[in-house]
Image (spheres, helix red, strand yellow):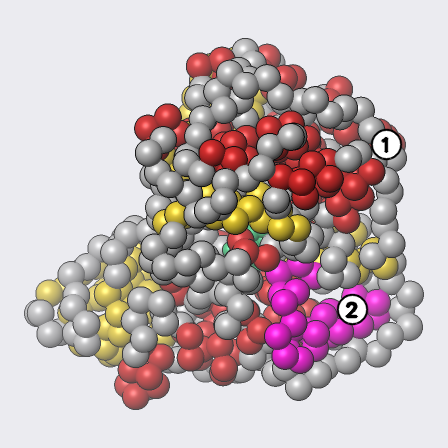
C-alpha cells in the first residue's frame, strides 16, 4: 500500500495499535524539554527512580524563564542542569537560544520521532522528523523508555504549487492555512506538505510552517527530507544525519488542500486569535506602536537576512519600538559576523536575549491599547502582558517594513536578499553541555514537590466554578508572563493565578467550595502544552471539565492528572450544581439547578479509564 510520509514514520515506530479506539503508541527516539515545563517533567522523571534516560537523545533547554527577577528562575535552571548531568541529558544553558530553533540547528534528524514538552516541538519536523508536543509527564515517560500514545492521526495532504512572490513569506503560507482551517481544524491530524512548491522552500521556512501548525491544533506537521534538507544539515556540519524521505507517489490523504504559492499575499493574524486572518493590504491604516521580531517561529538567520535587507540604510519610525530576538547563539553570531547586526542597530532596533522573551510575556509588554506587530505564533488575549493591547502576527518582512513606516505595510513585490545565505554556520555549542553523570541534583527553595491527588470517584456532585465560551486557551486557564512563570515549580503558589486574567476570584471560589467542575465550549485548552493548566485546577479541587470538545495536548494532560474530560455541550451558569457519574461505557451529567440531564459515551480507553480511577498517572508508580 502506498504510504504517506506521516505513516511511514509512525509505522516504523509503532509499538502497539488499538484500532477499536483509533489509538496507537509509538517509540520515541528524541525528547526535548524547556525550563517552564521542564521542572515538572524532571520532578516526574525523578519519581520513576531511573538512573539514565532511555532515549537516543534527550535535551533540556532553558529559554522561557530567563528574566531572573528573584531567585526562582535561577533555582529552576540549577535544578535542570544538575538533573540533566546526572541522568544523561544534554543541557542547553540560558542564552543558547530558543529550544525549537536550537534543536532544528543542532539535533533534529529526518525520520526520527521527537516528543517535546512544548506545543511548538513540531518545528523540528521541518527536516522531515515527526516531532510532537506533549505534556511534561508524557515526555518524562518517554525519557523512561515508555511508548507515547496518540489518536491515530488523519493526514491532511497540502500540495504546494509554484513559488512565493517577492515580499511573501513562509509565514504567510501558514497564516493563510490557519485562516482556512481554523484553530481547531488540525486536531488529531498531521499536516503533510508535498508537491513541486516544496523545493522552493528552505528548511528554516519549512520550520516556520511546521512550528505554527500548532495553531491548527495539529498533532504534528511534516515536510519531506530532500536536497534542501541535505544542504541545511551540511551547513550545520552534520550531513551524516541526512536520510532522504518522502511520501509514496500517489498515496492517499484523508483530506486534500492545494495552495498555489504564487497566488498568496502577505497576511496577518488579527487580535486575538491566529485564525482571525486578513490580508495586510486591508490593515494599512493601522498605526503601529511596537514591532517584535523573534520567537521560535521567525528567528532564523534566514529571517534576519530579509529583515536587514528591508532595514538597510533606513531608520525606524519615531513612534515605533523595534525589538529583535535572534533565535539562537548561532543566529546571533551569524548576524554579527555578516554585518546584519550593524544594519539593525543603525535602524534603531533594541537587541534582546536569544530566548522566548516577549512571546511569553517576559518583558516588552506593550502600552495600554497599543498595536504590536509580532513575528510570533500566538496573539491570545493577555499573553503579551497587556490585556488591552492589539497583537497582530505577521511575517518578518511585514514587521520590518511596518517598523520603518509606522503603519502596517505590505512588502508585496519588494525584491529582498542582499545578504548572502551561503555562509558557514558557526558550530557555536559553547552553551551546550553533554552529561558527565557526576552532579548531584540541586533543589533550591523554589522547587516544591508535586502534590498527590486522590481519585475523583465514579460519581460526585460539584458546582460549576466557571462557564466559558469556545476556544479557551491555556493562556486563559494558566496565564504565563513575568509575574506567574517563576512559580512553574510551585503548584500551590501558581494555582492562585488560574483564570486570573478573566476571573480574579476563580481560585478563591474553588478553595471555598472544595470541589468543582469547569464548563466550556469547543476546543477547550487550545495552545500550549503546559500541564500546569491541568495540575493547578486539580489542586484547586476541579474534578471534571465538561466541554463541547478538547484540544489534544490539554485533554491528555487532564487525564494524566486524574481530571475527567467530558466531551459534551451543556447549559450551565456559574455555581449551578452539577452531578457527574460515569463508568467505562457512559457518562451522565445532570445540571441539578436547571433540572437538565445529558448522557454521552465515555470515550476513554481502558488505560485512560484506569488512570482516572487511580487519580492520575503519577499514582501508578
Ligand atoms: C507557549 O508558547 O505557549 C509556551 C510557553 O511555549 C508553551 C509551554 C509553556 O507554557 O511552558 C507551549 O507552547 O507549550
Ligand atoms: Fe517560546 Fe514563544 Fe516559541 Fe513558546 S511560542 S516556545 S514561548 S518562543
Q: Position of residue 342 (x, y in %)?
A: 73, 39
Label number found at residue 81 = 2
Quadrant location of the N terminus in the rendered image: top right
- Side of 83 relative to 212 (left or right): right
- Residue 227 lies in quadrant: top right
Give me the residue at 36% from left, 31% from top.
284
Residue 465 visible somewhere in the drawing: yes
Q: Position of residue 355 (x, y in %)?
A: 65, 55
Q: Is residue 243 above or below residue 604?
A: above
Q: Position of residue 92 (x, y in %)?
A: 77, 58
Which of the pair 356/240 is nearer the observer?
A: 356
Question: Does the magenta portion include 245?
Answer: no
Characterize the local packing of mark 1: few (<14), some (14-19) or many (20 or more) Cα atoms within 10 angstroms: few
Element class at badge 1:
loop
Which residue is disc 1 drawn over? 424
Give me the residue at 52% from left, 32% from top.
401
Q: Position of residue 321 (x, y in %)?
A: 52, 49
Characterize the local packing of mark 2: few (<14), some (14-19) or many (20 or more) Cα atoms within 10 angstroms: many
Q: Main secondary structure of the magenta part?
A: helix
**Whole-Å distance between the Cαs marked 1 and 2?**
30 Å
What segment carries the magenta color?
62-87
Element class at badge 2:
helix
Amino acid at each position: 500500500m502506498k504510504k504517506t510520509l506521516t505513516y511511514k514514520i509512525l509505522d516504523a515506530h509503532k509499538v502497539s495499535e488499538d484500532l477499536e479506539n483509533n489509538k496507537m503508541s509509538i517509540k520515541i527516539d528524541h525528547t526535548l524539554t524547556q525550563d517552564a515545563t521542564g521542572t515538572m517533567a524532571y520532578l516526574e522523571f525523578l519519581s520513576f527512580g531511573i538512573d539514565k534516560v532511555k532515549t537516543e537523545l534527550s535535551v533540556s533547554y532553558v529559554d522561557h524563564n530567563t528574566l531572573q527577577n528573584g531567585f526562582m528562575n535561577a533555582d529552576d535552571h540549577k535544578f535542570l542542569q544538575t538533573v540533566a548531568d546526572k541522568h544523561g541529558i544534554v543541557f542547553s544553558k540560558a542564552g543558547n537560544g530558543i529550544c525549537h530553533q536550537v534543536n532544528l540547528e543542532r539535533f533534529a534528524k529526518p525520520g526520527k520521532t521527537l516528543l517535546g514538552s512544548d506545543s511548538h516541538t513540531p518545528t523540528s519536523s521541518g527536516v522531515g522528523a515527526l516531532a510532537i508536543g506533549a505534556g511534561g509527564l508524557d515526555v518524562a515517560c518517554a525519557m523512561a523508555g515508555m511508548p507515547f500514545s496518540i489518536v491515530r492521526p488523519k493526514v491532511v495532504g497540502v500540495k504546494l504549487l509554484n513559488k512565493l512572490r517577492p515580499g511573501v513569506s513562509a509565514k504567510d503560507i501558514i497564516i493563510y492555512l490557519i485562516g482556512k482551517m481554523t484553530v481547531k481544524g488540525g486536531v488529531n491530524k498531521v499536516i503533510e506538505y508535498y508537491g513541486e512548491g516544496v523545493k522552493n522552500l528552505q528548511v528554516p521556512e519549512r520550520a516556520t510552517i511546521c512550528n505554527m501548525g500548532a495553531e491548527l491544533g495539529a498533532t504534528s506537521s511534516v515536510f519531506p527530507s530532500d536536497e534542501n534538507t541535505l544542504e541545511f544539515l551540511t551547513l550545520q556540519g552534520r550531513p551524516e544525519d541526512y536520510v532522504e524521505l518522502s511520501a509514496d507517489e500517489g498515496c492517499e490523504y484523508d483530506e486534500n488542500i492545494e495552495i498555489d504559492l504564487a497566488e498568496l499575499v502577505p497576511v496577518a493574524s488579527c487580535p486575538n486569535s491566529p485564525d482571525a486572518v486578513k490580508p495586510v493590504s486591508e490593515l494599512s491604516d493601522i498605526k503601529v506602536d511596537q514591532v517584535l521580531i523573534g520567537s521560535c517561529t521567525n528567528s532564523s538567520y534566514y529571517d534576519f537576512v530579509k529583515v536587514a535587507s528591508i532595514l538597510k540604510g533606513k531608520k525606524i519610525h519615531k513612534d515605533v519600538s523595534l525589538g529583535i530576538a535572534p533565535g539562537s547563539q548561532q543566529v546571533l553570531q551569524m548576524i554579527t559576523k555578516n554585518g546584519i547586526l550593524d544594519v539593525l542597530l543603525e535602524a534603531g532596533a533594541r537587541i534582546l536575549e536569544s530566548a522566548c522573551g516577549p512571546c511569553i510575556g517576559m518583558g516588552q509588554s506593550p502600552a495600554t491599547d497599543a498595536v504590536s506587530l509580532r513575528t510570533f505564533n500566538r496573539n491570545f488575549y493577555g499573553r503579551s502582558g497587556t490585556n488591552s493591547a492589539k497583537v497582530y502576527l505577521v511575517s518578518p518582512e511585514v514587521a520590518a517594513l511596518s517598523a520603518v513606516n509606522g503603519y502596517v505595510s505590505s512588502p508585496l513585490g519588494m525584491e529582498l536578499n542582499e545578504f548572502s545565505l551561503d555562509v558557514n554556520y558557526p558550530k557555536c555549542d559553547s552553551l551546550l553541555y553533554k552529561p558527565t553523570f557526576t552532579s548531584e541534583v540541586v533543589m533550591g527553595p523554589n522547587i516544591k514537590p508535586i502534590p498527590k491527588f486522590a481519585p475523583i470517584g465514579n460519581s460526585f456532585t460539584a458546582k460549576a466554578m466557571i462557564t466559558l465560551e469556545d476556544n479557551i486557551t491555556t493562556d486563559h486557564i494558566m496565564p504565563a508572563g513575568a509575574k506567574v512563570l517563576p512559580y512553574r515549580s510551585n503548584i500551590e503558589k501558581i494555582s492562585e493565578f488560574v483564570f486570573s486574567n478573566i476571573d480574579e476570584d476563580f481560585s478563591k471560589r474553588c478553595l471555598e467550595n472544595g470541589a468543582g467542575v469547569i464548563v466550556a465550549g469547543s476546543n477547550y485548552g487550545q495552545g500550549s502544552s503546559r500541564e500546569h493548566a491541568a495540575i493547578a485546577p486539580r489542586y484547586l479541587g476541579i474534578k471534571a471539565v465538561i466541554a463541547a470538545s478538547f484540544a489534544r495536548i490539554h485533554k491528555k494532560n487532564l487525564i494524566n492528572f486524574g481530571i475527567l474530560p467530558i466531551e459534551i455541550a451543556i447549559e450551565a451558569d456559574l455555581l449551578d450544581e452539577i452531578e457527574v457519574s460515569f463508568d467505562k461505557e457512559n457518562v451522565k451529567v445532570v445540571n441539578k439547578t436547571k433540572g437538565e440531564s445529558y448522557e454521552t459515551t465515555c470515550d476513554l480507553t481502558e488505560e485512560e479509564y484506569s488512570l482516572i480511577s487511580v487519580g492520575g498517572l503519577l499514582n501508578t508508580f
